[in-house]
Amino acid sequence: MTQFLVFALLGGIGLALISAPLGVFMVWQRQSYFGATLAHSALLGISLGLLLQTDLTITVIVVSMVIAWGIFTLSHSKQLSSDTLLGILAHSSLALGLVLISLQNSVQIDIMGYLFGDILSITKTDLWLIAFTGVLILLFYWRHWRDLLNITLNPQLAQVEGTAVKTVQLQYILLLAFMIALSMKIVGILLITSLLIIPPAAARRISDTPEKMLLISMLIGLLSVLGGLFASYHFDLPPGASIVLAATAFFAILQLKKAPM
């Protein structure tokens, strides 16, 4: 097997494994649109990076984390519902990014490349960045898994029991923003948001404990990457789209299963 396929396989597996822990709480807390909002803000980061002539990866990460902090701050103002706020920020950041790009006549950019990515172009540096992100997520969940469960069930009760609710939520949001911004360059917005949402949504159907849902969602993400890359290699299909369709197939099949009591 050639090196680019090995790197694509390792990168896809790595992203599937680090997406699941973040994705399960997005699904539990009904914040799936949050990932899409951060993905749209990443395009704003690209346009600003081109305008300011700075490193695109660093600019995307900074912009995504600033917008994530803004979402967190505004969501606690109680003046707008969460879904309304996310909708406004998602579309406005995307529109602003496209306007800024259109004003730069000398700049040519492949928007489709950022939307769908190219998992077959993963490099050794990208693999190390995925591994680094995985370590950050592992450390965060090792320390705050129980806190996140309590916050998901009842934020007020978690606060009373001594959990620093806002601090934990902010750390989770910033970590999610960092992961999406980093992954966008590698696999594209649509693939990373799909890996965040579809495997946990599929796993929820057959899970009766949080830990079981996490493990099953990681397994579904892993199998989706393997199946998608297999189909891409043998049938000459777009790899990112094939992975998303494989995950969707798992979701559809598991909907036929009887949910656990």
Image: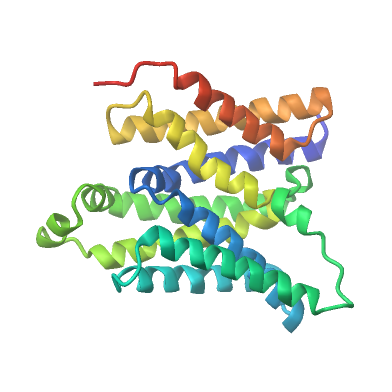
Q: Quadrant of residue 195?
A: top right
Horizontal side, residue 195 vs residue 69: left or right: right
**Image quadrant in which you'd find residue 183:** bottom right
| Residue 127, image x, y percentages | 65, 49
Residue 253 in the image, given as x and y percentages of width and height: 51, 19
Front residue of 46/91: it is 91
Front position in the image: 21 or 80: 80
Q: Position of residue 121 (x, y in %)?
A: 78, 47
Q: Quadrant of the C terminus?
A: top left
Residue 54 vertical placement versus 5 (above, below): below
**Which residue is outermost to the bottom?**
52
Residue at 59%, 51% (x, y): give it.
130
- Residue at 65% x, 55% y is 184
Q: Residue 103 appears at what percent x and percent y?
A: 79, 79
Answer left or right for 50 relative to 159.
right
Tell me which residue sits at (89%, 77%) in the image: 106
